[in-house]
Image (cartoon, helix red, strand yellow):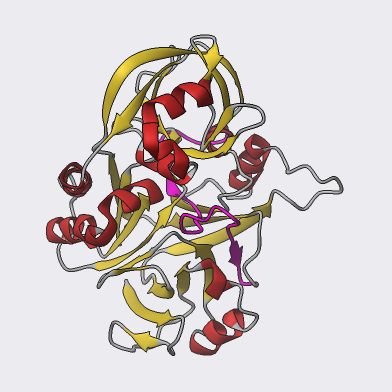
Amino acid sequence: MKTVQLRKSSNSDWHYLTDNITLIKPLVLVFGNRFMLEDDDILDEIRAIFKDGHIVFGSASGDISTQSVNDDSLTITAIEFEKSKFLIKSTNVLQTDSNDPIDSFDAGKNLINQFPKEGLKYVLVISEGSFVNGSQLTKGMNSFLEDNLLITGALCGDGARFEKTLASYNEKPKQGEIIAIGLYGESLEVSFSINGGWTPFGPERIVTKSEGNVLYELDNLPALDLYKKYLGEKAKELPGSALLYPLNVKTENEKQTIVRSILNIDEKANSMILAGDIFEDSKVQLMMTNVDNIVDAAEKAAVSASELRKKKPELAILVSCIGRKLVLDQRVEEEVEEVIEVVGKTTITGLYSYGEIAPFIGESNCQLHNQTMTVTLISE
């Protein structure tokens, strides 16, 4: 595997973070600032650098590279696989005759259905993060999967603005797009792990009214009113402050609890819009964390992803959550540094997201997570 990495800030030209070597038909991952991805010339700029590259764009709430975490920039990671092959498929949840998005379950199922199964080892998903219901997207992908296929990925971000997210494959970045990159090859070794570092607190409450990813009532009381009561003065900063206090969700059908970020609020309906589905009769608790817990969780994810590997990773894909980034603030690079310390000298790429896609440890079906660090390690 050969890699090249470049970065461009909003007021500079592209500069190389690695040696400038020639790559043949590389996979080109471009993560970063949504406003920069909206530039009409961005595709042509990158095509000029990688003329035969397969270019995948994803807007981020911060782009991650081997050197740093950045907000107002784009980072390119170009990868030439020497022993493996990749295939890229895409779909768009907004390209319909009506104004309603395509069902996220169907989008996930139909997207994975496009891949030939024989030899498929791993799928990286870069999904838009504004219209897709990530819970249903992962369920749709799982419905067509073999048990031994690993899927990880991200819901694209837009800083803490939550205005719109962009993604694309070999075209100008646009809304509604979901990209899946399938890797094939006998020599491929792909491992992963996730960890959060958040702690539940306060009373456990029952979801008494919800619909999809919208939470209306807890213990038969308006959910938003209860949430504001807990937040106190921080309620004035909603919806942004909600990212600092996600929900720990337990359902009867799932063995594991899952963390759900609150992406927005609806004052008129007195409801909260979550990053993924929340079912009636689920039990929920507020969660909190601190910088040390988040950094420790990132280290644990890296250790877990590394410990059973046969070969040293050549590429590490990191997906962390916008909520973690807000807690870390000026110390945001510490969690990435902890991962680098564990995995050693390898190419690091990734993004801060609106949702992380990965299985639970020890399971095969992918899930939508929030507030986690997801580490995927790849070698040939």
266 on left or right of 283: right
The C terminus - image quarter: bottom left
Q: Position of residue 185 (x, y in %)?
A: 40, 57
Residue at image location 22% in from the left, 67% down from the top: 346
* Residue 302 picture location, percent across and down: 20, 49
Residue 60, above or below 214 = below
* Residue under the point 25% across and 73% down: 67
Q: Nearer the viewer, residue 329 or 307?
A: 329
In the image, residue 3 lies at what x, y percent? Answer: 33, 76
* Residue at point 28%, 39% (across, down): 196
Magenta span dominant secondary structure? loop
Residue 357 visible from this viewpoint: no
Position above or below: 308 against 336:
above
- Give the camera-side residue of 84 and 79: 79
Q: Dividing the picture into quarters, in which one does residue 76 lie?
A: bottom left
Query: Could you tell me if residue 337 is visible in this image?
Result: yes
107 over 143 or under it: above or below:
below
Tell me the quadrant of the picture where the N terminus can be found.
bottom left
Total of numbered circles in the picture?
0
111 drawn magenta: no
The front one of 82 and 288 is 288
Magenta segment: 142-171
Give the image location of residue 301, x and y in percent.
Answer: 22, 45
